[in-house]
Image (cartoon, helix red, strand yellow):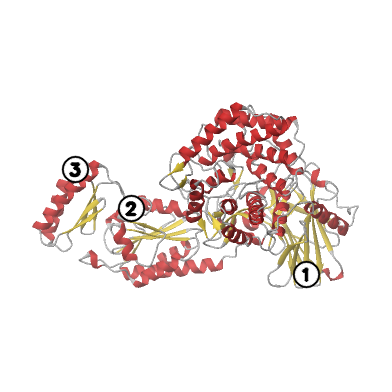
């Protein structure tokens, strides 16, 4: 292996998601006169097996052999992607021939079979969609003549494609090549870099499919477009061993922030993320959906952070909340840092524009402070000016200062930005820092820091004491409720879906979305979870927010899936190309293109929230009833249309079963509200509800799956169909419901988590299991009387809430890492609902699985 090739392998081994792909014969197995006697090179297989076990690394073997033969020869080594017949055969897409193709294949078999009988040394190989003529063992002249004769006759048959290989000619009746197969493998794993090794003419298609930054390696002699060449299968094994070593070294060197160890701060107008080690790595000002002043979490050092840590290494820190609050305490031996966004004095309900981040340093060890704000995700030059009692941030439209009395700063240039560094000794008493947004004043606050801290503790804990908690995991349910409250926008009642943008669903991949906005569906579901715990205030305030949004719509059926926290339309989705993303997961996005989708499930959670409030005796106003009627009109107008669905797949619109069920749920719960406040029942609504219900049961059920499918158009497993039983559309003792719950558990559950679906959603790469789906499965298991299984899954769900007890959107069971955006409302509301369901089911206080 040349030095140049070694360096290229070392470089590509550092790509976020690596795909290692190769041919079989002549690459990881020696070419032999009898293909049935080919054996894999043991060192090559050991290297591939090692790569298979690595995170963010996929292995593919793409061969001209039939798929069954190839998999048998690979034995215990199980690549992530195996394709036979030059890519025509894949595990998820077996070959089905039409009549014309089958007729052509039979003709080819007769023609090649006759040549085989007439010419010594020829060998015919029959595959599911092709016939291969091997002439390696025939005399050279006779072999070439037989191949030319076969081509002359077979190439003229309908739908026949000729492929030339190493001493073999193959006649295929389907269109396939290794380049297309490699594209498919790349899409499926979301690879950001590919290494392909091949030896044959058919491998040239794969070489052509590679991008300029990929690595192509030809084994043996012969003309090739591959950029690199090695001599033998043994050298291919050495190459794979080297690549495995480079990849393992890079993975070991990564020092990723574990998202499940991060803490959350909130003043109910904005939120901040504190990474392990008292490092403010995310803060948007003045609102959660504003631009960031600290964005290191998704942008690395260039995007800004605010760190307080011991000057000398002191080992890992430990973080926890001070009681039932968002006062976060980070501790090392001899050092304690306390952080909170000040929500005292009515700040939580004042218009966003003034924010105070308070940081208190206590202890006995010398401490280092690094203050590196970066305005607008680092897109604006951020200069710092030292003033008496602190620092002024220059470059912002609104004033920003850091009050730090008694701290001596060293302001250093860092490109177009400034960074302020200070060394302090807290042994003589606490040191208070206060980042103030919206004022240039560095004067002392009117109240002491201990008084403000106590008010913040009481602000959160006083609210949490009013909750009616279940007997199952009460402390974690309380923390989940607090997280939802932290996402509530105090001034107007909107609820953000999460606190962050672009934390990836697949580390290194492109599934990175901005969740800092208000989804009416998600917000209503979050508020409903709080109502179930006895809190109606946030639900009523959210309904006011929704009324304002709906009143500004041209018609109720045009309600969008997403709005800003203030209730306005989102800006166009954009990518911040200068930021590398969390763990090199590009792109970092702001805005969300899903705001322009059609999502017909948006209406039901709003109506259901009003129904829950009515059932609990909350004051339902004429405006609330007007909102319900508007949602019903929207369903009447559009329920029969296809939409983009709850999962926001960026595909064409489809008839999603979950969306149809939610249209039914809208009408069903509207009837409940009507009976509650008017004592009547609208017959037209009842008829429509029954029409939708019958269609869902008839068209949504798939006999082949033995379960309800994700959409009418095609059968695939989708956890969202669990809402059919959870909403009451189908009876819990209906065999179809029981079968669907069992199907989801069997096909979509992956250890402690549940995946959303198994189908191609049009995006590259995969994702983790979705916490809301785990919660749905827990509830569904209780509905069919499987309390033990539900409790076991809930306990495993609860295990994700360690440390600061903050849930991301998903969990990756392959890497055992939290993935997706932080402080995800979906995740926390689903944990609340699941705990309530298990508690109710085990205590028999309510009908099994019924949400009340």
Circle 1: element type: strand
Circle 3: element type: loop
Q: Disc 2 vs disc 1: Cβ atoms closer than 8 Å?
A: no
Would you identify the image quadrant in which residue 219 lies? bottom left
Tell me the residue at 77%/53% (across/down).
Answer: 464
Which callout, 2 or 3, points at the residue further toward the start of the chain?
Answer: 2
Judge left or right: residue 191 versus residue 316.
left
Residue 157 is tagged as 3
Judge left or right: residue 211 versus residue 250.
left
Rendered-image quadrant of the N terminus: bottom left
- State which mark lies toward you, 3 or 1: 3
Which callout, 3 or 1, points at the residue further toward the start of the chain?
Answer: 3
Between 361 and 732, the one nearer to me in the picture: 732
Circle 2: element type: helix
Residue ID for mark 1: 335
Mark 3 surroundings within 10 Å by alpha-carbon count, few (fewer than 14), some (14 through 19), many (20 or more): some
Q: Is residue 150 above or below residue 664?
A: below
Residue ID for mark 2: 87
């Amino acid at each position: 292996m040349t030095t140049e090739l070694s360096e290229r392998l070392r470089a590509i081994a550092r790509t976020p998601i690596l795909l290692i792909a190769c041919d079989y014969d002549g690459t990881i197995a020696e070419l032999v006169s009898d293909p049935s006697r080919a054996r894999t090179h043991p060192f090559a297989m050991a290297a591939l097996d090692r790569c298979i076990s690595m995170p963010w690394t996929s292995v593919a073997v793409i061969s001209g052999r039939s798929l069954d033969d190839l998999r048998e020869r690979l034995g215990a080594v199980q690549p992530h992607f195996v394709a036979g017949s030059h890519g025509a055969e894949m595990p998820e897409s077996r070959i089905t021939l039409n009549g014309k193709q089958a007729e052509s294949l039979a003709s080819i078999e007769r023609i090649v079979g006759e040549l085989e009988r007439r010419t010594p040394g020829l060998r015919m190989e029959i595959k599911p969609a092709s016939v291969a003529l091997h002439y390696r063992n025939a005399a050279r002249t006779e072999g070439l003549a037989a191949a030319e004769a076969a081509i002359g006759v077979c190439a003229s048959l309908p739908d026949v494609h000729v492929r030339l290989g190493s001493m073999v000619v193959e006649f295929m009746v389907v269109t396939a090549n290794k380049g297309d197969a490699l594209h498919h493998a790349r899409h499926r794993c979301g690879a950001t870099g590919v290494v392909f090794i091949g030896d044959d003419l058919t491998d040239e298609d794969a070489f052509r499919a590679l991008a300029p930054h990929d690595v192509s390696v030809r084994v043996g002699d012969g003309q090739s477009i591959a950029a690199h060449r090695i001599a033998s299968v043994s050298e291919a094994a050495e190459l794979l061993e080297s690549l495995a070593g480079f990849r393992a070294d890079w993975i070991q060197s990564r020092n990723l922030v574990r998202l499940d160890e991060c803490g959350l701060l909130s003043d109910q107008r904005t939120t901040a993320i504190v990474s392990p080690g008292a490092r403010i790595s995310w803060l948007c000002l003045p609102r959660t959906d504003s631009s960031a002043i600290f964005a290191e979490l998704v942008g690395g050092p260039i995007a800004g952070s605010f760190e307080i840590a011991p000057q000398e290494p002191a080992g890992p820190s430990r973080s926890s909340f001070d009681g039932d609050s968002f006062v976060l305490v980070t501790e090392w031996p001899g050092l304690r840092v306390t952080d909170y966004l000040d929500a005292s004095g009515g700040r939580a309900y004042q218009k966003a524009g003034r924010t105070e981040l308070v940081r208190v340093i206590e202890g006995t060890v010398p401490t280092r402070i690094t203050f590196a704000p970066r305005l607008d995700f680092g897109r604006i030059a951020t200069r710092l000016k030292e003033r008496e009692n602190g620092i002024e941030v220059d470059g912002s439209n609104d004033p920003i200062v850091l009050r730090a009395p008694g701290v001596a700063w060293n302001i250093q240039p860092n490109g177009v930005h400034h960074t302020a560094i200070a060394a302090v000794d807290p042994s003589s008493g606490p040191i208070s820092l206060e980042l103030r947004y919206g004022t240039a004043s560095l004067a002392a606050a009117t109240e002491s820091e201990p008084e403000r801290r106590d008010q913040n503790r009481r602000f959160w804990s006083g609210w949490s004491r009013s909750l009616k908690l279940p007997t199952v995991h009460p402390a974690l349910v309380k923390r989940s409720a607090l997280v939802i409250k932290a996402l509530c926008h105090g001034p107007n009642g909107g609820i953000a879906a999460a606190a962050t943008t672009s934390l990836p669903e697949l580390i290194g991949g492109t599934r990175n979305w901005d969740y800092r906005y208000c989804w009416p569906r998600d917000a209503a579901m979050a508020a409903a979870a709080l109502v179930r715990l006895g809190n109606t205030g946030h639900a009523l305030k959210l309904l006011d927010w929704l009324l304002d949004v709906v009143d500004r719509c041209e018609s109720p059926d045009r309600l969008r899936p997403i709005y800003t926290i203030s209730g306005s339309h989102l800006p166009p989705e954009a990518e911040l190309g200068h930021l590398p993303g969390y763990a090199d997961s590009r792109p970092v996005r702001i805005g969300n293109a899903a705001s322009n989708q059609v999502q017909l499930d948006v209406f039901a959670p709003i109506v259901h929230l009003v129904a829950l409030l009515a059932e609990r005796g909350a004051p339902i106003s004429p405006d609330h009833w007007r909102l319900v009627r508007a949602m019903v009109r929207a369903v009447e107008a559009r329920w029969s249309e296809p939409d983009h669905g709850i999962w926001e797949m960026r595909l064409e619109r489809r008839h999603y079963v979950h969306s149809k069920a939610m249209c039914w749920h809208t009408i069903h719960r509207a009837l409940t509200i009507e009976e509650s406040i008017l004592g009547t029942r609208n017959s037209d609504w009842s008829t429509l509800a029954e029409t939708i219900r019958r269609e869902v049961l008839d068209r949504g059920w798939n006999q082949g799956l033995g379960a309800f499918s994700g959409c009418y158009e095609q059968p695939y497993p989708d956890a969202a169909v669990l809402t059919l039983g959870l909403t009451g559309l189908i009876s819990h003792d209906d065999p179809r419901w029981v079968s669907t719950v069992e199907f989801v558990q069997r096909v979509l559950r992956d250890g402690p988590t549940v995946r959303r679906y198994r189908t191609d959603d049009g995006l590259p790469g995969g994702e983790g299991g979705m916490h809301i789906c785990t919660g749905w499965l827990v509830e569904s298991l209780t509905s069919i009387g499987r309390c033990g299984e539900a409790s076991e899954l809930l306990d495993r769900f609860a295990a994700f809430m360690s440390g600061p007890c903050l849930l991301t959107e998903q969990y990756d069971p392959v890497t055992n890492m939290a993935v997706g955006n932080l402080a995800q409302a979906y995740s926390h509301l689903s944990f609340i609902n699941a705990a309530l369901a298990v508690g109710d089911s085990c205590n028999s206080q309510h009908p099994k699985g019924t949400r009340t």
